[in-house]
Image: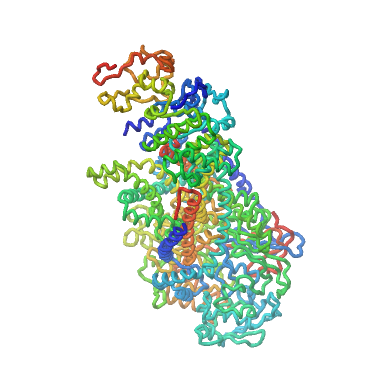
Amino acid sequence: MANKNKKTVENFKSESSPPTGIQVVLREFKKDKLAMFSFLGIIALMVAVFVIASWIIDKEAVMKINLIERFTEPGVSGYILGADEAGRDMFGQLIIGAKNSLLIAIAITILANVVGITLGIIMGYYGGFIDNFFMRIIDFFITLPTLMIIIVVVTIVPKYGITELIFIIAAFQWMSTARLVRSKALSEARRDYISASKTMGTSDFAIMFKGLLPNLSSLLIVEVTLNFAGNVGIETGLSFLGFGLPPSTPSLGTLISYAMNPIILSSKWWIWLPASILILVLMLGINYVGQALRRSADAKQRLG
Amino acid sequence: MGFVSTKELLTIRNLRTSFRIKDTFYPAVDDVSLTLRKNEILAIVGESGCGKSTLATSIVGLHNSIHTKVEGEILYNNQNLANLTEVQFNKLRGNDIGFIFQDPLSALNPLMRIGEQIAEGLIYHTKLNKKQREARVLELLEQVGISNASRVANQFPHQLSGGMRQRVMIAIALSGKPAIIVADEPTTALDVTIQAQILDLLKSLQDEIQSGIILITHDLGVVAEIADRVAVMYAGEIIEEAPVIELFRNPKHPYTRSLLNSIPQTHSENEKLEIIQGMVPSLMKLPREGCRFSSRVPWLDESVHEKNPKLHEVGPGHLVRCTCWQHFYFEDKEGSVNG
Amino acid sequence: MKKKYWLLLSTVFAIMLVLAACTEKETGSEKPTDKEPEKTEEGAKDEGGTTAEQPTLASEVTNEGDALAGGTLKYALVTSSPFKGVFNWELYQDKYDSEIMKFTTNVLFDTGEDFLVTDKGIAKLDVDVDNNKATVTIQHDVKWSDGTPLTADDLIYPYEIIGHPDYTGIRYDDDFQNIVGVVEYNAGKADTISGIKKIDDKSIEITFKKVSPAIYSIGDGLWGYAAPKHQLKDIPVADLITSDAVRKSPVTLGAFKFDKLVDGESVQFVANEHHWRGKPKLDKVVVQVVPPASIGEGLRTGQYDMASSYPTNQYDGVKDLTNLTVLARPELAYSYVGFKLGKYDTNQKINITDEKAKMNDVKLREAIAYAMDIEQVTEKFYQGLRSRATGLIPPVFASFYDSTLEGYNYDPEKAKAILDEAGYKDVDGDGIREDKEGKKFSINLASMEGSDTDEAIIEYYRQNWKEVGLDVQLSTGRLIEFQSFYEKVEMDDKEIDMFMAAWGTGTNPSPAGLYGKGATFNFSRFVTDELTALLNDIDSKEAMDPAYRGKAFRAWEDYMFAQATTVPMYFRLEIIPVNKRVKHLNIDWMNETKWHEVELVAENPVK
Amino acid sequence: MWKTVIRRILIMIPQLFILSLLIFILAKQMPGDPFTGLITPETDPNRIEELRIKAGFYDPWYVQYYNWITNAAQGDFGQSYTHEKPVASIIGDRAEKTFALALFSVILVYLIAIPLGVIAGRYHDTFVDKTIVLYSFISFAIPAFVLYLIFVFVFGYRLMWFPTSGTVDVSLDPGTWEYYWNKFYHLLLPGISYAILGTTGIIQYLRTEIIDAKTMDYVKTARSKGIPMKKVYSRHIFRNSLLPIAAFLGFTITGLLGGSIFIESVFAYPGMGKLFIDSILSRDYSVITALVMLYGFLALLGSLLSDIILSIVDPRIRID
């Protein structure tokens, strides 16, 4: 098996090969410098944000209202990115906001994908009644007007903070992953190596998560990456509509939603623009990484 | 086997087809010269990756013009096909030259009816009107042995069996009554029983329309069955070329011998299969100087290879590259020398 | 390839930045241009100005130029939602519908000082206090917009609509049931309302169960509007609200009449030639819903002549514009901090004060009040458009407002001293005071979600309180959205120790409905016999005398100040930007320009 | 095929039923009610209580639900408490506006995305392709509403090329040519803004499809027939790549309706999305429930529509 893979890798034209293995991904990244750059950039950005937010910035000091510094412009009196109408440091808010947004997006992605993948594999592996039962549920959930229901739920939840937001959004995000994993697992589960494992008496659990799962890995990496990008968007969208986090918990979404006030939009750019650009750069990066990953999962599109 | 004319239909001289990888061109077909005569089936044999399919697509100009460079001469009717523009080539393709693909399912447009697909070429190469084209389509379908032609013409590819599809492909290739047919592994994707039918069909059609066929294959069984002449390719080069009987009886190049050995033969039950292990080196790592086969036979002394291996005529119409064949022996597992 | 990508990317950013930068230059010139709003001699009076920080905005403007004959006034109604389109005074519930109806108003009475009824309107009110009766008489030859004369029947019909068993609006209330015979009529036991009599074609007599000073503020059940009976009589009351007579083409008495309508978006009015005060000088008025986000730009670019409900947090957007004048007048409202001191008993329908309530310590409440730096907030966040409220009666009620009240001036040292004295001391030295028993002490504040500014303001107050050693946390950890807020406050949610809210006072400043013993809206749940007596005095028959009533108000305000259960925060100014092509406009509550008098001096709004 | 369509529609009924139950219960859980908004010192709390009782808000939820669903089954979705008219009528008004915007946007999206996708795929790896890819990436990455706001600001307020609120000028008479032109004029800015950002999916999908298609054997077959390259592209590559895009239509429309919440909020366009947000704020239960049901129904319909289109354009897929 390994030898066969190697042969494909070394052949100039990859004619047909199962898209597996982290080498394929690595090779794809080596080929695509922009994706590589994006990947490293995102990692660096995340690390920087988390480090600065957790150890360097004092949240209380950032959120302290200082009326003398109301709408201080960037670069004036030590405010790198200026201050908002309450004199709160925008740079600090940007970093804390980015941390919160990333945290939310990562948590939702992990939560939704763990549920989705587990359910998908179970459905695909067992098939039959379990598969049918959950498929009905997924069919139902997938056609729901998700955004509307999230908004309704958000208004119901009394104490509504980061954790609640994560759970609410994650509750509506697992279905597509489950469906994707299920369809792949369904075909994979019919393969010989699975039947072989079964006859050898390997436990179902081991087959599902040690046998099946790794074979779906490259597909899942793509799915997870793109989900992550989507989840950053959902949080900002909700905040924009006024159903997101309170301003005392800054997130990229709350910072951007300040732009709703035309005066801030037109003459106080430092309040909303940095957060917008951060999102833009982040999403672009994820997209380039995602594209490279997708290429590595699809032999036809590989660069070489 | 039909009568092979001596008239040269297609002459390939010093053909070099290179692919671009990161701004560098790597030849996949390197300095190949071949001739195809009228009413002849020329088989080109080799492992996958040896450049035989590239050779085929170069002849019909189906390669990607951005990433591929074709140098040398492919002479047909006093035209050098290697220098033709797309527009010029289109006058030949489907008319003078037909092409048959390996996998008839993917080679047919899944969203077009069979009849439409066959008729498409007729629009540009004939002056037939719509009705006449339809009639010609049915005629072609019957010619390739499809009995319920009018029904099949209205069907989509996915509704046909593999063999039927390949017959349709052949019908497409024949639609312009071509002088040359290039068939790239036409039977590989088919069941064994169907393979035989398709080969029979090809052969009978050739007798009928007297065209030259270039048959690309890795299957020596197929070669033995219908080819007139065989060229063996390795790493972009032709390493041996001979009439089919000569090649099977008297293979010279170690690679050819190894290939022939890989066919299980009933009459040599007791003989040990002797095959050279390893594979064709990748395009980028290919040694461009010296004998390209040397890396597969490391147990032979360097000196037995030519510096610039050339094809040597060793018999009537029998050419072999390099001199190493004269010194070749199979490496035995136990280290003993074996002839 | 990479270079190209980044080049493009940076171009995109550059464009965005340039856009942002040039717009900044155009609007946000930070330097004050010292451009005084235009004032006329008579318009320069300081409206309700209680503190020095208020911008000196006039309530009146006169612009140069000869008036056009006719013209179209473009009026922006600032709201983010479409209007509901119920154009009937008996049925409407949405504030914006009433704003639109200003142009077509069916109002019977003019009001003057303290919003009390005068004799200058269509009808005259005569109250027979001893017999609990009132007579309403049509004084002029008034016609509806379709030319039909206004009669006594049109004065009675509104009562029959509101009292009707099929009526589903909010106006069939306790006040309305003060009219004799209404309850029977509503129950279907009577065909007419026995307390309402038609005297002749021009006058009606109404009998009440009791009469209070509120009747001069058109309270006690008296209805201030006429309804076009000839248009409405054939439509069942249940169907009125969806009928064209209400939604599309109501017949009216005002200066303008409905001409065209785009549902929820805009209305075009044309002059009502039958208007009893005379034909309006304008030909048309177009009222257009404009979202808060775009109104500033709309005014700047001359798309609108004036805007009502202009968002005060966007004052920056218009204050320096040269093509308009920002007029201001006080709002009939005040903001306050309330403390939860008890519960509403739904069975007995009374408020019960809990002696042991966490906030039931007047010293603690006072300290909280003194610790709030309200002046900084009004100046910085509200740009002077709000001012520190010193009492619970807005200054607009000239006879009742007492300018000598001081309220709780910001004095953190005093707050600390009061807390020390009351026994709230910082035992464990963390800078936060513990309660009298030395246990951790934290107060839960509920506040309503509004603009981003609100959040910052609450945070600022929390900082204020922290400075005097009080730990104030937000109930539910964040600002509460309007609906949840009122539900929680009304239900006496345990998580709420104090709350910030605002009351519109309406034109009748009587506090009974907000502080009375049985009042559901007495959210503090603070009741004492003394308070009940003070409130009763305000609405007593003696209080028909404004001077007496003024004193009663003062006594009540003094009591409330001493108890500190409701701490007034701000009085508010409403701003109305007016384009310079409007010849003259006065928005002073007492001398408001009538719509039929409005004139324009140019074909198009000044840009 | 009709059998399947009918079967799919029948399956929708229980789905919608569950959805109605879910949303009904959720909506009732929201704190406050339509009458909370009426609280002022001048309103009588007793009257508000009376109205609440009249509206049945104190009945057990299953009684309320039963009443609602039985009426809904007969096409009566109840009264909107804040608009004081039947829910069906208020949603009807708004739906017309949202559909007009959605239709215009969809047309624009396809008008922009198809040529760009085709060009990017056709001239794969050239500068043009890379520019288009960059555009599609940026349009995906940019926080949509920020761009909407900037668009409104620049083209609406500053340059004044487009109106910035409402759907039509009040002074025009319905039925006249000017009236419809004016309506269309009001659609332009929101429609264009949406379309500029909404093309990502189609461009990328189409581009990949075409790049894939180019390497397909059937394209080589077509070339081997000697037909001109232009025809190879138009008859084989584009046609085969575009067909799945047609099937996107259903999803695009439902996606757009979901996006209407954002678009309509920014452009103050009084459609269904704006109505939803307003109804949430005013706790207009009946409108919320009906809207969610309608969106759910449209989503189901959209996916059915996509399947039907796909089965029509792709002979390999047959639903029967």
Where does the C terminus of chain C fall, quadrant-wise? Answer: bottom right
Residue A94: give x, y in percent of width and height. 47, 45
Q: Is residue C585 above or below residue B115?
A: below
Residue C142: give x, y in percent of width and height. 70, 78
Q: Residue furthest left?
A: A201
As rendered, which of B234 and C262 lies closer to the eye?
A: B234
Residue B213: give x, y in percent of width and height. 47, 28
Q: Is residue A267 above or below residue D40?
A: above
Tell whether B164 sits left or right of D186. Answer: left
Tell whether D19 sits left or right of C200. Answer: left
As rendered, which of A39 and B246 lies closer to the eye?
A: B246
Residue B201: give x, y in percent of width and height. 44, 35
Number of marks present in the image shown: 0
As rendered, which of C14 and A199 lies closer to the eye?
A: A199
Q: Is residue B198 above or below residue A209?
A: above
Residue D49 visible somewhere in the drawing: yes
As rendered, which of D117 and C422 lies closer to the eye?
A: D117
Quarter of the image where one finds residue C309: bottom right
Which color scheme is applied? rainbow
Q: Residue furthest top?
A: B303
Residue C544 visible somewhere in the drawing: no
